[in-house]
Amino acid sequence: MKDPYVSFDIKNKVGYIEFFHPNHNAMPSDVLQKLEQIIVDAENTEAKVLVLKSGGERTFCAGASFNELIAIDNEATGKAFFSGFANVINAMRKSGKLIIGRVQGKAVGGGVGLAAATDYCLATKYASIKLSELSIGIGPFVIEPAVTRKIGVSNMSQLTLNAETFYTAEWAKNKGLFAEVFETAEALDESVTTLAEKLASYNPEALQEMKKVIWKNTEDWDVLLSERAEISGKLVLSDFTKETLKRFK
């Protein structure tokens, strides 16, 4: 079993950011912090475009670490925990480089948020998605702005309220989360590489200006996502959520 990691490699002016955790790529706080820092540090590299991907062949990202979630015992710790994905999404938003998402498998909770926060996302047919937070007594408050921005309020609500259902990659494509869906990981990788290297050959100033246009009207997200993390941090301490979480121990 591999150890968790976050890596960064540059090839042909494309920066490949890869995260991994042996528990279905669930993201504990330390991995999220490393991911955020690498996205920030990539700003000062020769990479013209970034690709966000995860290790392994199956799950893209199972969301936040359940073990950490169960251990939360006060509001400050709760807010800090839920700020993990908020900080990564804001780092992606504020990056001057376009970010391509490579989603090879299932995405749950925060994993859907990461996919939504990319500027262009490609996936395989195995990349079904689910927002399961309501089923355990919280909600996808932190990632909601990114998800809604990509697929709209109606589709976000459908995902959120039908919290125990996986929606297919084709559904996610039809709603605007994925640009294309491929039969195999090999076909996905070929398309990701081709697109990333093509973009990296374009005028970098034009790419930066396009990034600003894509993320127009999100300047309040530093505050907004922090407020959302606070909401989740309180809800995780509720009697309902605590009782629900006991079943997963």
Image (cartoon, rainbow, N blue to C red):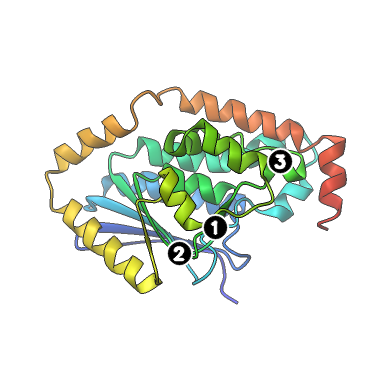
Q: Which of these two is toward me, 210 or 177?
A: 177
Q: Nearer the viewer, mark 3 or mark 1?
A: 3
Residue linked to disc 1: 61
199 with respect to 185 (left or right):
left
Q: Nearer the viewer, mark 2 or mark 1?
A: 2
33 with respect to 217 (left or right):
right
Determine whether the residue tagged by mark 3 lies in a helix, strand or loop. helix
Few, some or many residues within 10 Å of mark 1 (<14, 14–19, 20+): many
What is the C-alpha distance between the residues marked 3 and 1? 18 Å
Residue 59: x, y in percent?
54, 64
**Is residue 177 visible to the viewer in this orientation of the structure?**
no
Q: Nearer the viewer, mark 3 or mark 2?
A: 2
Residue 227: x, y in percent?
60, 25
Amino acid type, callout 2 = Lys
Q: Residue at x 57, y 70 (%)?
A: 3
Task: Please state, as top left, top right, bottom left or bottom right, where the N terminus lies in the image.
Answer: bottom right
Determine whether the residue tagged by mark 1 lies in a helix, strand or loop. loop
Residue linked to disc 3: 134
Give the image quarter of residue 232.
top right
